[in-house]
């Protein structure tokens, strides 16, 4: 076995060079014909054929349910079917502008909303991912093969994350479309309105969105939850912002009630809503 190391080294280089001593070449040839060496070679071939997996290949994945009365995580299609049960009564408030709505039709008068460009889309409620689907999937192999649709069809981690109820809120369709996958920011104390009296604004040139103050704490706590659960990587700048928002804007009755309803349907809520210590621990350093 003392020749095994040089043998493997030679094999890894495809062949030993002509300058290898003849007696060593003879010994290596004997080792190469040995059954143990052949077995090791076969095992090596098998290992090379196993697809490589990232460290977070199973992070956050859950067994998905489809029945409306089942408790558990859902994919996005099935999540949309149960979301109306969460946003009822005092929780039926659109996220970015505070509008009331009924049957997914936005009541513009309730919030002083005015369409920026697309009144048809602005008239309906859409389900917005606070942490964009692009953030959840663009680094995954499925996204490289076929984008969001490929991930939604084949990747258990993405399916779970895309349908996570903690990350989904009702939004005016036009605002949802304008926000796109832009990062959040806060760059002005006096935003120039883009949608009537709505205080959320979008900077298309810089690809960023500034949400109204009432929802910033909810956004911060949602980001902390999603990035922890699904093993995502957050930039230092984004983490500082989300931690600041999570600490500055405390949990209110709307967020508490929403989290309680989500836990009843999904089996878990957001620990950053129910445990203030979790924010402190996650935001240290």
Image: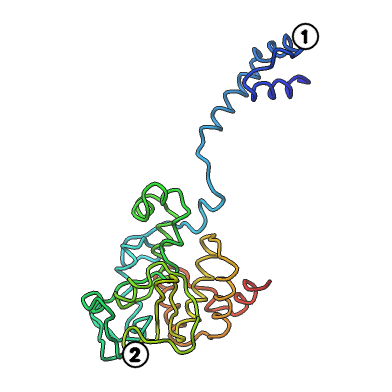
For the question of whether residue 166 can be seen, the reply is no
Asked whether the beta carbons under mark 1 and mark 2 sit within 8 Å of each other, the answer is: no
Q: Which residue is mark 1?
A: 23
Task: Give coordinates of residue 11: x percent, y percent.
Answer: 65, 21
Query: Residue 136's quadrant in the figure?
Result: bottom left
Image height of 118 relative to 161, above or below: below
Circle nearer the N terminus (1, 2): 1
In the rendered view of the protein, which quadrant contains the C terminus? bottom right
Query: Where on the picture, by quarter, is residue 224?
Result: bottom right
In percent of width and height, residue 102 lies at 24, 82
Looking at this view, is 88 or 135 the one in front?
Answer: 135
Q: From what the image shows, is residue 105 above or below residue 11? A: below
Q: How is the image coloured?
A: rainbow
Which secondary structure lies at badge 2?
loop
Q: Which residue position is annotated with label 2?
A: 197
Element marked by disc 1? helix
């Amino acid at each position: 076995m003392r020749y095994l190391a040089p043998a493997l080294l030679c094999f890894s280089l495809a062949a030993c060079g002509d300058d290898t001593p003849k007696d060593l070449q003879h010994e290596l040839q004997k080792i190469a014909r040995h059954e143990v060496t052949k077995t090791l070679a076969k095992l090596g071939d098998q290992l090379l054929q196993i697809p490589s997996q990232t460290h977070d290949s199973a992070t956050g994945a859950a067994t998905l349910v489809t029945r409306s009365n089942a408790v558990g995580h859902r994919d996005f299609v099935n999540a949309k079917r149960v979301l109306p049960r969460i946003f009822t009564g005092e929780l039926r408030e659109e996220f970015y502008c505070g509008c009331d709505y009924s049957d997914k039709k936005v009541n513009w008068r309730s919030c002083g909303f005015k369409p920026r460009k697309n009144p048809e889309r602005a008239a309906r409620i859409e389900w917005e991912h606070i942490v964009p689907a692009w953030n959840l999937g663009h680094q995954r192999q499925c996204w490289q093969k076929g984008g969001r649709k490929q991930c939604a069809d084949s990747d258990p981690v993405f399916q779970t994350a895309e349908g996570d109820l903690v990350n989904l809120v009702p939004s005016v369709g036009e605002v949802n479309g304008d926000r796109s996958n832009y990062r959040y920011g806060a760059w002005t104390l006096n935003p120039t309105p883009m949608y009537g009296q709505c205080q959320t604004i979008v900077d298309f040139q810089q690809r960023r969105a500034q949400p109204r103050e009432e929802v910033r704490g909810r956004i911060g706590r949602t980001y902390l939850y999603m990035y922890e659960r699904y093993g995502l990587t957050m930039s230092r700048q984004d983490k500082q912002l989300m931690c600041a928002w999570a600490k500055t804007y405390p949990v209110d009755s709307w967020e508490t009630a929403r989290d309680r309803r989500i836990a009843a349907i999904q089996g878990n809520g957001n620990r950053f809503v129910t445990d203030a210590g979790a924010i402190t621990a996650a935001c240290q350093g």
